[in-house]
Image (spheres, coloured by chain):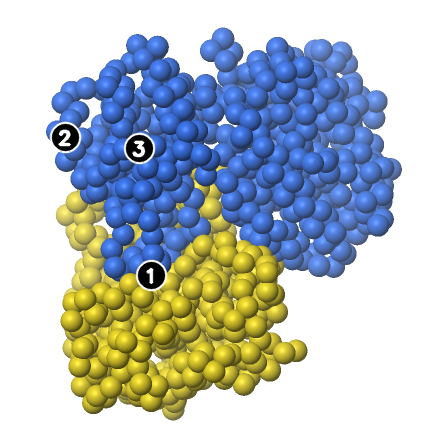
Chain colours: A yellow, B blue
Amino acid sequence: MFAKEVYVRRRRTLLAKMREAGQSGLILFVGNAEAPAQFKDNCYKWRQDSSWLYYWGLDEPLMAAVMSIDSGEEILFADDVEIDDIIWMGPQPGVESKAASVGVLRHRPYGEIAAWMEERVKGRPVHFLPPSRYYNTLKLQQLLPGGKPSEALIKAVISMRLVKEDIEIEAIDAACALGYEMHSVARDAIEIGIVEQEIVGKMESVALAKGWGVSFPTIVTQHGETLHNHLHDKRVEPGKLMLIDAGLESNEHYASDFTRTYPTSGKFTAKQREIYQIVYDCNELAFSLTRPGITYREVHLATARKMLEGLQALGLVQGDLDEMVAAGIGGLFQPHGLGHNMGLDVHDMEDLGENLVGYDPDQTRAKQLGLGSLRMARRLVAGHVITDEPGIYFIPALIEKFKKEGLGYDFVNYAKLEGYYDFGGIRIEDDVLVTADGARRLGPCRLPASPDEVEAVLAR
Amino acid sequence: MFAKEVYVRRRRTLLAKMREAGQSGLILFVGNAEAPAQFKDNCYKWRQDSSWLYYWGLDEPLMAAVMSIDSGEEILFADDVEIDDIIWMGPQPGVESKAASVGVLRHRPYGEIAAWMEERVKGRPVHFLPPSRYYNTLKLQQLLPGGKPSEALIKAVISMRLVKEDIEIEAIDAACALGYEMHSVARDAIEIGIVEQEIVGKMESVALAKGWGVSFPTIVTQHGETLHNHLHDKRVEPGKLMLIDAGLESNEHYASDFTRTYPTSGKFTAKQREIYQIVYDCNELAFSLTRPGITYREVHLATARKMLEGLQALGLVQGDLDEMVAAGIGGLFQPHGLGHNMGLDVHDMEDLGENLVGYDPDQTRAKQLGLGSLRMARRLVAGHVITDEPGIYFIPALIEKFKKEGLGYDFVNYAKLEGYYDFGGIRIEDDVLVTADGARRLGPCRLPASPDEVEAVLAR
């Protein structure tokens, strides 16, 4: 948690933005409840809502808060602990002091919010964010039947959370330092014959020992072509590519998110190295282009062009590079976008709407495979924190679909591609801060990334 | 997953029980959806609903099923994968073959369930279980507005899941073997000066490497008197008691749940050993009494008496033991019950209602502190799997409350108790199977439990 002043300042800024946008009425924030895994007393690890954390700081379940845009009045709804809570959860500070710790002067019991709203709303608009969990959906249905999330509020919140404050950048740097450690442990755990789940256990132990836990479900797979593979039941085989995409969420709830791809035998085969080099060059190119003023859509397209250039040199595609980019051939090999925003969420604010978060008002999201999955397309400004994560995947089902539908026949060498059906996939991902005059990779140092660096670190 | 025949047999038995109970109409099962942690694409680790796993086996989100009590007809609602799913999640078997793998012959798309229900229900009763998650609450509201869970179905399900089949006992033994390993790693990680979270990271890595993960949020604390302490931010200090209550859920989704309490310095102080010995004796007594025919309520009360006897010898309580037990003085020192059922859930079936699961129809739950928290009171039968977890805690806030309210003045030596305000708490928990002629502790061997065994293993 940051100092009280941070939360007071953020809420004041939010009010000012809402007033500037000509809004009036109330702003309602609903914090998370515990999320039952099996029953109400056996829950997943407690995680507060990120926008709540940003404005209200308090990292506890069953809280809500209302601000008046008109008067600036603020009230926290939360319950004081009772003797039962003390037996089960230990002595706790009262709501009074919790509220004071984030600069809120008034509070009422959590159960009173419905009655309070009924009395005070009186037809005034109530602005709230889209619920990120089913509990919040139910609670909002109960408090404001038929209510719709406020686009004005969403936009005001995005405008603030998208540009990271210095204290946030420090926190993300720290999360990336731990993410670096987590990835190093994973890399050192790769061993022919063990089950992938063993690597997951070792790497996630770092996330649990040093942070809140993982920032998203870990991907550890020798089938990198399956983008979100959460099964870890395969034994490590020689000659394969092991793709590890994993991040740590710090105790301050900031994310890291790195991907590396390792040859399980310690050395890349010639074929693996050729493809790896292309992905590495794309990652480097994206980083070199990242600076205020350029859009991340342009950076995505520049890496797509670079990727196709590399694949052309291998004879896997042919034709004019610009035409290929325009035709979306890049999406056949990289069906995802170049990167996403990162902060309190690993895909920052994705609960507020991918397009509102990742696209400027003058940008329209493409429908094309690959570019259509780009989560961050905006014109970059200093303070943006984004991922740089190009990848090349050979997905037999997708290639066969393209072929069957006659897509890309002018450009794609389908016969040659068949020789890559058992290749798998490669992705190289760093976390990047947009600075005043360029960009900086987050964390104390970069995980080994070039083919030579990777082989050298595996040989140790 | 078990063989197809297991699920077919269980569903047949369930139908027979519902018919025997004079029920008709339909039975609706709603499987879980992914549980968003921050947004819909960043979810907590996938966990299926346990009753769904028991009857339908399929370990995937967004499935539902309906059985007709009258005709025996069964239908699975689930979606076939599309090309997008293949890109993100890899090639998958079709619903046809998934359904067949658990002996279900008919299936329809998940989205059709509402229309199907509307057409087929026609005023017939629809039996469903209480929803264990907010998603399921929302889904049931949508499918059956105003509907209430079926007590007949709840009772039929409890009667089956409460008595474990041989294949389940094997699975729980295996989970306990891994839970043993997890606890051993935790014990070996205790070291003066490290932060408790480091121990958590090491022990949970075993759960992730060898199983699905933890079966409930891990407790690692030097404040054992706080029963559910999930903060792990303290450094290990000399002379303290470290209470570790943790379990592993296997890849087959069966739980283990053990507690041990260790002296951080390797040796108990004389005062710690006195209290530890009492808790150990209570654990042993409970195990020795556990057999078909006795109620677990009786076992709970016998251990409460044993505990008060031990505390009396130390001069902390005085008076007639039976009167003390009847007055609930045990609850001042052990505000929780002796144990709970365990199986697919660590508190088995707690989503179906604690009293229906843990109490026979002729038993009423007490209101008294301690006995009132007893989750399993039933008359034991072979196949029950329960925990044996007595504990003694010195909770200053609770003792002060008793004192202030004039409770237990005849029995409690409040002056002497003040000398224990910084003592903490001790719990010793094993998992126990009720056998034909007694009981067996689950797992390949018992974690060191007696004071001497504990000191010996810490000295290694």
Question: Are labels 1 and 2 assigned to the same chain?
Answer: yes
- Does the residue at mark 2 contact the one at mark 3 (Cβ under 8 Å)? no
The secondary structure type at the circle numbered 1 is helix
Residue B54, quarter of picture? top left
- Distance, label 1 to label 3, CA atoms, is 27 Å
Q: Which mark is residue B118?
A: 2
From the viewer's side, name the closer residue of B293 and A4.
B293
Find disc 1 in the rendering and name its residue: B88
- Does the residue at mark 1 contact the one at mark 2 (Cβ under 8 Å)? no
Closer to viewer: mark 1 or mark 3: 3
Where is residue A184? Give x, y as percent: 58, 71
Q: Dot 3, crowdedness within 10 Å: few (<14), some or many (≥20)?
A: many
Placement of B89 over or under B406, stated as above or below = below
Q: Is residue A144 left or right of B447 when viewed as pictured?
A: left
Closer to viewer: mark 2 or mark 3: 3
Where is residue B265? Give x, y as percent: 82, 49
Find disc 3 in the rendering and name its residue: B104
- Distance, label 2 to label 3, CA atoms, is 22 Å
Where is residue A217? Give x, y as percent: 44, 58
- Does the residue at mark 1 contact the one at mark 3 (Cβ under 8 Å)? no
What amino acid is labelled 3 in the image?
Val
